[in-house]
Amino acid sequence: MMALLKRDLAIATRSGGAAMLGVLFFLAVVAVIPFGIGPDLNLLARIGPAILWIGALLASLLGLDRLFQADREDGSLDMLVMQDWFALVATVFVKSFAHWLATGLPLVLAAPLLGLLMNMSALSTGAVMLTLLAGTPAISFIGAVGAAIAVALPRGGLLVSILVLPLAIPILIFGVSASYAAVTDPDPFLPPFMILSAIALFFAALGPVAAAAALKGASD
């Protein structure tokens, strides 16, 4: 599994630089907002957590269609699907985690810089980082299901985004709610953050199983 993790990280780094591409897209989305809203620093600070979350969600979708595509092109996907059920589920889990390390984790690390761009306080930026750290892995595990469904399609990138976005809406809702609750006194931070963490754990358990079933179905 460690060898598979290193291989997938090497592929993600080699094929277009998934980490840098995601960060640049994240920066582009967030940087455009002040031009559209205007130089109202208070308004930017209020909507900053939501903008960062939306940008991170869209940037996390990059490269999902390539999650199994490289294995399909070199023929190794057939070998992976021929494994027993539990080994295939574990393989999908590792590949999804590798995608998050290459795409999702750099977004978390880039959040403080973009928080300065949105005039956010240190507390608000820290809350966004914590919620992104808890929530973005779920997007990779959901994306594994979409990538497995679209693996046999020549241009499945758009289909993966269409499949993943509706399922990722609860992650966005509770991630933004927890971020706002951290800087709003009457609102408790812990309940939405715990729900966000529970959603992430739920998809971490269900996503690899559903993706493995989709891969088995596609190979039949």
Image: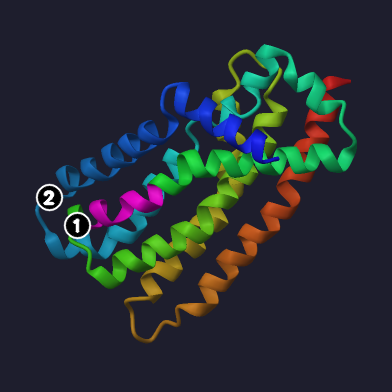
Q: Main secondary structure of the magenta part?
A: helix
Q: Nearer the viewer, residue 84 or 63?
A: 84
Above or below, 55 relative to 3: below
Which residue corresponds to the image point at 57% horizontal and 72% vertical from the top-left?
194
Q: Residue furthest front?
A: 3
Element on which disc 2 rests: loop
Question: Would residue 74 appear left or right of 45 to someone viewing this image?
Answer: right
Label 2 Cα neighbours within 10 Å, binned few <14 / some 14-19 / many ≥20: few
* Magenta stretch, residue numbers: 107-115
- Is 104 in the magenta? no
What amino acid is at disc 1?
A: Leu
Q: Quadrant of residue 50?
A: bottom left
Above or below, 2 relative to 15: below
Q: Residue furthest bottom?
A: 186
Q: Give the number of the disc on residue 116.
A: 1
Which residue corresponds to the image point at 45% horizontal and 57% vertical from the top-left?
132
Instruction: Return the disc, 1 or 2, that comes first in the chain's sequence.
Output: 2
Q: Position of residue 37 (x, y in %)?
A: 18, 49
Is label 1 or label 2 in front? 1
Q: Nearer the viewer, residue 76 or 113?
A: 76
Q: Nearer the viewer, residue 179 or 37?
A: 179
Q: Position of residue 87 (x, y in %)?
A: 83, 39
